[in-house]
Image (tube, grey):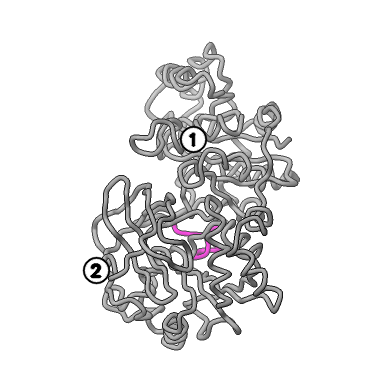
Amino acid sequence: MVARLVIAAPSSGAGKTTVATGLMAAFTAAGLTVSPHKVGPDYIDPGYHALATGRPGRNLDAYLCGTDLVAPLFRHGADGCELAVVEGVMGLYDGAADQGELASTAQVAKLLRAPVVLVVDASSQSRSVAALVHGFASWDPEVRIGGVILNKVATDRHEHLLREALGGSGVPVLGVLRRAAEVATPSRHLGLVPVAERQAEAVDAVASMAEQVRAGCDLDGLLALARSAPPLDARAWTPAFEAGPHSGDAVASSAAVAGSGRPVVAVAGGAAFTFSYAEHVELLRAAGAEVVAFDPLRDEQLPEGTRGIVIGGGFPEVYAPELSANEPLRKAVSELARSGAPVAAECAGLLYLARSLDGKPMCGVLDADARMSGRLTLGYREAVAVSDSPLAAAGTRLRGHEFHRTVLEPGAGPVPAWGMVRPERRVEGFVQHGVHASYLHTHWASRPEVAARFVAACGT
């Protein structure tokens, strides 16, 4: 059994990230092995969680992966750990639009049988805090709110009023954080700036979060609450099992390739490409690939022996001049893509394969041009593969997530990657030669055959 806590709030902006990351760092510093998790599709917060704990930050998304995988993925990430801290998303009961509780923090807490700590922004209230906490604690009797942390408290007098109001609520106060200058975690158009772009400053920010939490929270009480979670009856997800021989012909083919030498799959990283799920690399390796990272900002050549490329999300628009200036790598990527080798590109990867980004030349694999816009495209999607590709057979259905402020013209090639079926019907992305490029972020744990199929394509 893993002791566990879910850190939630009534709404965004209450301080979940500060509290969750601070708790992860404080408990790690105290000698506990802490497993970090994030509800939802967010890529950036897990980077800070990884910095706080020394372990990969992992996402728990009931929409992308399905409710049946939440507990197994949690068990996989928390294997060998003494404590797991799960940061929620938005407000406690907010989930996928028009889908009830699906993908909400509350749903994940119930699937994990985990107690919830509610972080409340108390800056503009006193006695009303009791009504707010009572409402959240009683809304769903299956959600156990085991404590509250009061954030942005002004003075000792303010704290006294808040504690007095909550005295009869039945929900203990497990922390009080004073109003303070914001921890140095700068944001821009898609949220916090990723750790990879500000490593030294991010280390300082996490240390500040840990100190705030240590000074203001009852760590012993929080740990006791975490240890009160009941046993979790779920088999741990394992990439070796999910991408093992039972997965079908694609894995059998990749295993044959691996027998004659594991094919090298180059995975983009560095400051411009920071969005990825840890399970993707694990699945690629389990399917028989040798995964090698490369940085399109710094490396002038692909890793030796590259047979396929995976380019995930990130912020290429921030680094367009530098990416464009690395002409040798752009040429190498273009040549490999045009040779028919499998290339999987999501969002930032799509922009990198385009002809240009904000007027700067990119790889030119796709006959399309990208630019920043003032419009945010955000939300969950249901999609079906329009045609066969190295990622999916035509007709394959899966769920994904879009999150970008760029526009690609045209938005789809002669052979689109996906047909969107919810919430709107349209085609999107590009399939050509071995390239599959799209704005859609996907979580391969929900469809492990994607990794197996991709590695198999690296051997043809």
Alpha-carbon distance for marks 1 and 2? 36 Å
Relative depth, front residue between 395 and 434: 395
Find residue 430 and report its image quarter.
bottom left
Q: Give the range drawn in magenta.
A: 193-202
**Residue 115 is covered by the magenta coloring:** no
Question: Where, quadrant-wise, is the C terminus in this rendering?
Answer: bottom right
Q: Is residue 326 visible?
A: no
Image position of 338 (left or right of 450): left
Q: Which residue is drawn at 48% across and 21% down?
A: 140
Q: Is residue 125 above or below residue 319?
A: above
Q: Label 2: how many residues lie within 10 Å, few (<14), some (14-19) or many (20+)?
A: some
Residue 212 in percent (x, y) is at: 57, 41
Image position of 452 (left or right of 31): left
Question: Where, quadrant-wise, is the N terminus in this rendering?
Answer: top right
Residue 49 in percent (x, y) is at: 58, 50
Q: Residue at x 68, y 41 (%)?
A: 235
Q: Under tag 2, what secondary structure?
A: loop
Find residue 32 and report its image quarter.
top right
> Hey, which residue is sitting farthest front in the picture?
249
Q: How many marks?
A: 2
Q: In this view, does 224 lie above or below 77?
A: above
The kind of residue on which mark 2 rests is Pro
Q: Residue at x 53, y 67 (%)?
A: 454
- Determine the main secondary structure of the stretch shown in magenta: helix
Image position of 322 (left or right of 204): left
Q: Residue at x 34, y 38 (%)?
A: 97
Residue under label 2: 410
Q: Is residue 142 above or below residue 197?
A: above
Relative depth, front residue between 292 and 298: 292
Residue 316 in percent (x, y) is at: 39, 69
Mark earlier in primary sequence (1, 2): 1
**Circle number at residue 105:** 1
